[in-house]
C-alpha cells in the first residue's frame, strides 16, 4: 500500500479512498476544467470502529459518532481541506 505525505500528514491510499467514498467524490466524473465539487454526502458507516478512520479522527480530519456497535464517520473541515489539496479541486460540503 502506498502512503502519501500531504502537508506533513501521511495518509494511506485506503484512507484517501475512504475519504473520497464518504463524500461521494469520484475524480473521473469531473468535467474538463471543473475546479470545484459539492459533496453529495458526508458519512461512512462501519459495523465496528475502523483503525484507519480512528486515525483520521485523532488527526482532526474526521469525527465519529456511535450507534449500537456501529460507527458513523464524517470528514471535518480540515478533512475536506486535505482532500481538496490532494485532488487540486475545491471539495465543498453540501447542505
Image (cartoon, rainbow, N blue to C red):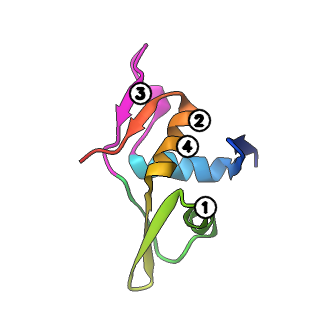
Q: In the rendering, which numbered label is found on residue 86?
A: 2
Secondary-structure class at tag 3: helix
* Structural crowding at the residue carrying mark 2, measured as other residues with C-alpha within 10 Å and reported as few (<14), some (14–19) or many (≥20): some
Q: CA distance from mark 2 to mark 4?
A: 6 Å
Counting residues from the N terminus, which is met first, the one under dot 3 or under dot 4?
3
9 within the magenta span: no
Q: Main secondary structure of the magenta part?
A: loop
Q: CA distance from mark 3 to mark 2?
A: 16 Å
- Closer mark to the observer between disc 3 and disc 1: 1
20 or 61, which lies in front? 61
Q: CA distance from mark 1 to mark 2?
A: 17 Å
Name the image quarter holding residue 35.
top left
Q: In the rendered structure, are the residues bearing label 2 and label 4 in contact, judged by CB atoms less than 8 Å apart?
A: yes
- Closer mark to the observer between disc 3 and disc 4: 4
Span colored in magenta:
24-41
- Determine the residue positioned at 53% across, 56% down: 61
Read off the residue under disc 3: 29
- Determine the residue positioned at 58% across, 70% down: 50
- Determine the residue positioned at 50% across, 50% down: 78
Name the image quarter holding residue 53.
bottom right
Read off the residue under disc 1: 59
Counting residues from the N terminus, which is met first, the one under dot 3 or under dot 1?
3
Read off the residue under disc 4: 82
Q: In the rendered structure, are the residues bearing label 3 and label 2 in contact, judged by CB atoms less than 8 Å apart?
A: no
Counting residues from the N terminus, which is met first, the one under dot 3 or under dot 2?
3
Q: In the rendered structure, are the residues bearing label 3 and label 1 in contact, judged by CB atoms less than 8 Å apart?
A: no
Q: CA distance from mark 4 to mark 1?
A: 11 Å
The location of residue 36, given as percent across then percent down, is 39, 27
Q: In the rendering, which numbered label is found on residue 92?
A: none
Q: Is residue 78 above or below residue 7?
A: below
- Closer mark to the observer between disc 3 and disc 2: 2
Q: Is residue 67 above or below residue 63?
A: below
Amino acid at each position: 500500500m502506498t502512503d502519501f505525505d500531504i502537508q506533513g500528514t501521511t495518509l494511506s491510499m485506503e484512507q484517501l479512498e475512504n475519504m473520497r467514498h464518504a463524500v461521494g467524490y469520484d475524480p473521473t466524473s469531473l468535467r474538463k476544467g471543473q475546479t470545484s465539487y459539492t459533496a453529495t454526502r458526508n458519512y461512512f458507516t462501519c459495523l465496528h470502529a475502523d483503525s484507519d478512520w480512528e486515525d483520521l479522527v485523532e488527526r482532526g480530519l474526521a469525527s465519529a459518532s456511535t450507534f449500537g456497535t456501529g460507527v458513523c464517520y464524517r470528514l471535518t473541515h480540515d478533512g475536506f481541506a486535505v482532500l481538496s489539496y490532494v485532488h487540486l479541486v475545491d471539495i465543498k460540503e453540501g447542505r
